[in-house]
Image: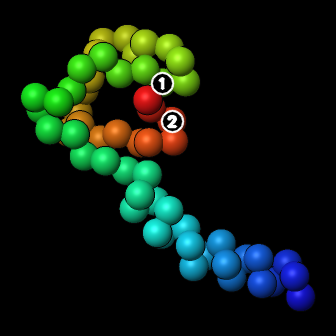
Amino acid sequence: MLTIMSTIFLLLTAPISVFFCIKIVKEYERAVIFRLGRLIPGGARGPGWNLGLIIS
């Protein structure tokens, strides 16, 4: 019973958590990006997504 309730809770809160963890960065806001404490080679690329849990 507890496993089922935990799974339901996770499924209900996961979309909300993802919403708060993703930030779209504007072009002029992009600077040095670190991933897990290391500098990403080549600098910022792509549309400017920032995953708050991984990239600081």
Q: Label 2's element?
A: loop
Question: Which residue, given by chain and number where applicable, does mark 2 sit on?
Answer: 54
Question: Which quadrant: the N terminus?
Answer: bottom right
Q: Which of marks 1 and 2 is nearer the N terminus?
A: 1
Could you classify mark 1 by the number of other residues whose Cα lies within 10 Å: few (under 14), some (14-19), or many (20 or more)? Answer: few
Badge 1 element: strand
In this view, the residue farthest toward the bottom is 1
- Residue 52 lies, with reference to residue 22, above or below; the image says above
Label 2: few (<14), some (14–19) or many (≥20) C-alpha neighbours in 10 Å: few
In-image side of 9 versus 47 (left or right): right
Q: In this view, does 15 lie above or below 8?
A: above
Write down the quadrant of residue 33 in the picture.
top left
Q: Nearer the viewer, residue 48 or 16?
A: 16
Type of the residue with mark 1:
Arg
- Seen at 50% across and 62% down, the residue is 17
Cα distance in 3D space between marks 1 and 2: 6 Å
Query: Residue flagged by tag 2: what amino acid is it?
Result: Ile
User: CB of mark 1 within 8 Å of CB of mark 2?
Assistant: yes
Q: At 46% across and 59% down in the image, what residue appears?
A: 18
Q: Is residue 4 left or right of residue 30?
A: right
Q: Name the residue under label 1.
A: 35
Label placed on residue 2: none
Residue 43 percent coordinates (x, y): 29, 16
Left or right placement of residue 6 versus residue 9 in this view: right
Q: Is residue 43 left or right of residue 1?
A: left
Residue farthest along the left direction in this orientation: 28
- Identified at 30% across, 17% down, the residue is 32
Colouring scheme applied when the structure was drawn: rainbow
Q: Position of residue 45 (x, y in %)?
A: 25, 26
Which residue lies at the image location 44% right of the left edge and 42% below the top edge? 52
Instruction: Give coordinates of residue 56: x percent, y percent.
Output: 43, 29
